Image (cartoon, rainbow, N blue to C red):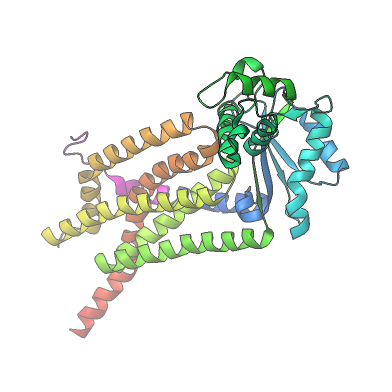
């Protein structure tokens, strides 16, 4: 399938304008990053991150004040999920080892005092599967302990408790008894015991992660090294497969892609974490693949007609690969766009970076990599040819 046949676009005519525009965007991106800094996730910055869902929309300012009163300073609180989820992401800054370990429990104590002051008994939105299994085992509504197999009895009630806790994984909060029905492992008698001794709290901690500052610094260092080594490896590969001028063009295009994507990512305010590093490496691989396809066609055309100017060869090669570029980029954008729109907040930053990376990578393979090859050849190739002519 081909969308474009026998095209003759003069891509190189706009090379100076596009390179100047790219230089301005790169400088602006780097300036924004250094002036505002990245929104580092706990993977790199260290600290504690909790996702908490409430049955009613929480007052963020009030919650921030309560945390300050409890000695938890500079907590970051932001809405999470779709409208109506009443979920927040709560991040506490990095602290020393002992404070870091107790940070999550201190936050939960503050939430418990504020939102669950009227809750007594076993909280189905706060306790876990093992605690509920112990409660059922103590009451033994199914008479499992009469068999003398205590291990089997605990496993029986653990399966019933797991059915109840599965509701929290799907809905976040259990709000009403009508949501809990007897099942394969949860008998009507066991459900009756739960109804008699349990209640529903007004919030649930969906996830809680803590990273010590030493670990965050190590992950940050390794993540940056992964990007640096990938760029160096790509330069070496293209240098040996093609020529140095093509390797320089690809490397400049990749540096351009990383800088622009990082600037847009920072401007959008998404969290920079290990998933972001994976997205950057994906963008680098996609971009260099596009450049290699163009350079391979350039090499073939140079062999066929050595007297043709490099500008004409680049234009012809870009036109010949235009249909392939449109198909590849279009289908990739379709898939990544679906991830961005439908994937949810958890992978929103990852899909945003891929979406931007595909667009920027396609642009750079045409208007950054190819013009840099032309500039390199004009600057150094002429001197090399003059030196060879003088030696002859």
Relative to the observer, which residue lies in front, 179 or 171?
Answer: 179
| Residue extending furthest toward the top | 178
| Residue extending furthest toward the front | 147
Q: With respect to residue 81, does 27 lie above or below? A: below
Instruction: Say left or right for 243 vs 45.
Output: left
Res. 268 image quadrant:
top right
| Residue extending furthest toward the bottom | 391
Relative to the observer, which residue lies in front, 216 or 247?
Answer: 216
| Residue extending furthest toward the left | 304
Q: Quadrant of the C terminus?
A: bottom left
Relative to the observer, which residue lies in front, 222 or 391?
Answer: 222
Instruction: Say left or right for 163 vs 106.
Output: left
Query: What stretch of residues is rendered in magenta?
Result: 1-20
The answer to whether one can see residue 305 in this image is no
**84 part of magenta stretch:** no
Whole-percent x and y of residue 123?
73, 29
Whole-percent x and y of residue 335?
37, 34
Instruction: Say left or right for 339 vs 195.
Output: left
Q: Residue at x 67, y 44 (%)?
A: 49
**11 part of magenta stretch:** yes
The answer to whether one can see residue 76 in this image is yes
Q: Residue at x 37, y 65 (%)?
A: 233
Whole-percent x and y of residue 229?
44, 65
Q: Residue at x 68, y 23 (%)?
A: 193
Whole-percent x and y of residue 203?
72, 29
Res. 122 image quadrant:
top right
Relative to the observer, which residue lies in front, 329 or 176?
Answer: 176
Q: Residue at x 24, y 42 (%)?
A: 324
């Amino acid at each position: 399938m081909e969308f474009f046949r026998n095209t003759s676009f003069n891509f190189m005519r706009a090379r100076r304008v596009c390179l100047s525009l790219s230089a301005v965007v790169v400088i602006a991106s780097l300036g924004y990053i250094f002036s505002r800094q990245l929104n580092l996730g706990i993977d790199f910055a260290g600290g504690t991150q909790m996702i908490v869902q409430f049955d009613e929309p929480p007052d963020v300012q009030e919650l921030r004040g309560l945390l300050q009163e409890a000695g938890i300073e500079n907590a970051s609180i932001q809405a999470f999920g779709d409208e109506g989820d009443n979920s927040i992401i709560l991040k506490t800054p990095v602290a020393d080892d002992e404070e870091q370990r107790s940070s999550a429990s201190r936050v939960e104590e503050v939430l418990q005092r504020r939102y669950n002051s009227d809750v007594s008994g076993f909280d189905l939105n706060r306790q876990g599967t093992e605690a509920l299994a112990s409660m059922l085992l103590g009451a033994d509504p199914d008479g499992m302990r009469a068999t003398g197999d205590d291990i089997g009895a605990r496993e029986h009630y653990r399966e019933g408790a797991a059915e109840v806790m599965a509701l929290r994984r799907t809905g976040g909060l259990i709000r009403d008894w009508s949501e809990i029905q007897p099942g394969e492992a949860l008998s009507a008698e066991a459900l009756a015991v739960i109804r008699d001794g349990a209640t529903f709290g007004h919030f649930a901690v969906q996830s809680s992660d803590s990273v010590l500052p030493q670990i965050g610094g190590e992950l940050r260092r390794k993540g940056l090294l992964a990007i640096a080594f990938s760029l160096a490896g790509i330069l070496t590969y293209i240098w040996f497969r093609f020529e140095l001028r093509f390797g320089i063009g690809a490397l400049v295009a990749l540096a351009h892609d990383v800088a622009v994507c990082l600037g847009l990512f920072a401007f959008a305010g998404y969290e920079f974490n290990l998933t972001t590093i994976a997205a950057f490496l994906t963008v680098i691989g996609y971009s260099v693949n596009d450049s290699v396809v163009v350079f391979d066609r350039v090499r073939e055309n140079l062999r066929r007609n050595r007297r043709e100017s490099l500008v004409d060869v680049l234009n012809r090669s870009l036109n010949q690969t235009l249909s392939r570029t449109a198909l590849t980029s279009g289908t990739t954008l379709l898939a990544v766009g679906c991830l961005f729109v439908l994937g949810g907040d958890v992978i929103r930053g990852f899909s945003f970076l891929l979406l931007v990376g595909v667009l920027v990578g396609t642009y750079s393979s045409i208007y950054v990599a190819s013009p840099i090859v032309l500039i390199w050849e004009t600057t150094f190739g002429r001197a090399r040819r003059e030196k060879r002519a003088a030696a002859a």
